[in-house]
């Protein structure tokens, strides 16, 4: 079965760029009609969708984050990545990657999810 | 923007039925999905397409839809069901994702 694992620094300084990678095992990110997505959750708060990518390179981002977000994929490594620029303390959160079930380009649900990676923005 | 509204908390005693609602602020309502999140863990899908249950999810979890409101029902609640529950949908174009604010289910 497909499993996802986030990796990356747990501490990022303000104004710098947050970078995370999601490694997919048990299946290819290039197969099937799946998108791949990032979601975050500040401590004690709800879930916020960041964006998604199809391995063709097609992406969609949350409008509230669009100016600072880039999601990319490396099919040779079976990974996809998140970059969030100009971070502030408000970007401190657990960041999850997840597989997205879709009908064509229509987003449906997320399953499975990675275990999450806590990123703290602090000097 | 499209919004989903959930009650912040629901409390039930073991063996009772818990109902968690999720209201959309506009029509048409798209399919809704439900996730269970226990402390320190990633969310887990428990209902998809309003009322379908993934394999491995207990039969006591069910979903329904009426108008712009979807409901997650947990029949015969067990202590292990205590968790946060989130509903999720997409906007009318299917391009952007919306999550509800989450509901904390407490088993008394």
Image (cartoon, rainbow, N blue to C red):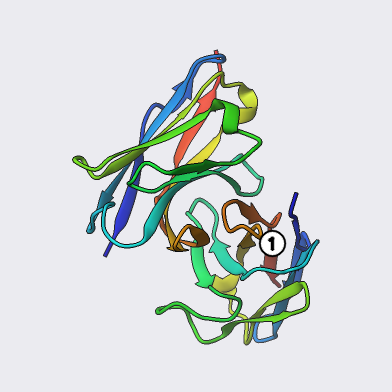
Vertical arrangement, residue B101 with respect to residue B75, above or below? above
* Residue that sits furthest to the left in the current view: A76
Tell me the subunit letter for badge 1: B
How many other residues sit within 10 Å of disc 1, few (<14), some (14-19) or many (≥20)?
Answer: many
B101 left or right of A22 in image: right
In the picture shown, does residue B13 fall above or below A123? below
Count the marks. 1
Give the residue displayed 58% in from the left and 81% down from the top.
B51
| x and y, in percent, of residue B44 in the image | 48, 63
A69 or B102: nearer the viewer: A69
In the picture, measured across the screen, residue A59 lies left or right of residue B36, that is left
Which residue corresponds to the image point at 26% horizontal and 65% vertical from the top-left? Answer: A1
Residue sitting nearer the eye, B16 or A14 = A14
Write the residue at 74% across / 54% down: B2
Residue identifier under label 1 = B104
Q: Height in image: B26 above or below A15?
A: below
Query: Which residue does the image show at 56% across and 75% down from the upper left?
Result: B49
Residue A52 position in % (x across, y down): 47, 46
Helix, strand or loop for disc 1: strand
Closer to us: A82 or A102: A102
Pick the residue in front: B40 or B71. Answer: B71
Quick check: B97 left or right of A35?
Answer: right
Q: Position of residue A41 (x, y in %)?
A: 58, 43
């Amino acid at each position: 079965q497909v499993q996802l694992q986030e990796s990356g620094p747990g501490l990022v300084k303000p104004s710098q760029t947050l970078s995370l990678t999601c490694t997919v095992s048990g299946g290819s990110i290039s197969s099937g009609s799946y998108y791949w997505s990032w979601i975050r959750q500040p401590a004690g708060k709800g879930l916020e969708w960041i964006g998604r990518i199809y391995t063709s390179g097609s992406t969609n981002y949350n409008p509230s984050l669009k100016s600072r977000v880039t999601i990319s994929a490396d099919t040779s490594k079976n990974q996809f990545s998140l970059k969030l620029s100009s971070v502030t303390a408000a970007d401190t959160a657990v960041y999850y990657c997840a597989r997205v079930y879709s009908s064509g380009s229509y987003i449906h649900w997320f399953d499975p999810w990675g275990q999450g990676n806590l990123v703290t923005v602090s000097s | 923007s499209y919004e989903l509204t959930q009650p912040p908390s629901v409390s039930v005693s073991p063996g009772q039925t818990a109902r968690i609602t999720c209201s959309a602020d506009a029509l048409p309502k798209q399919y809704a999905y439900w996730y269970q999140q226990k402390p320190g863990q990633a969310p887990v899908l428990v209902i998809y397409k309003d009322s379908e249950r993934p394999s491995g999810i207990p039969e006591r979890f069910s979903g329904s839809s009426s108008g712009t409101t979807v409901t997650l029902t947990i029949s015969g609640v067990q202590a292990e069901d205590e968790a946060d529950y989130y509903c999720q949908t997409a906007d009318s174009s299917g391009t952007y994702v919306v999550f509800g604010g989450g509901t904390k289910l407490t088993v008394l």
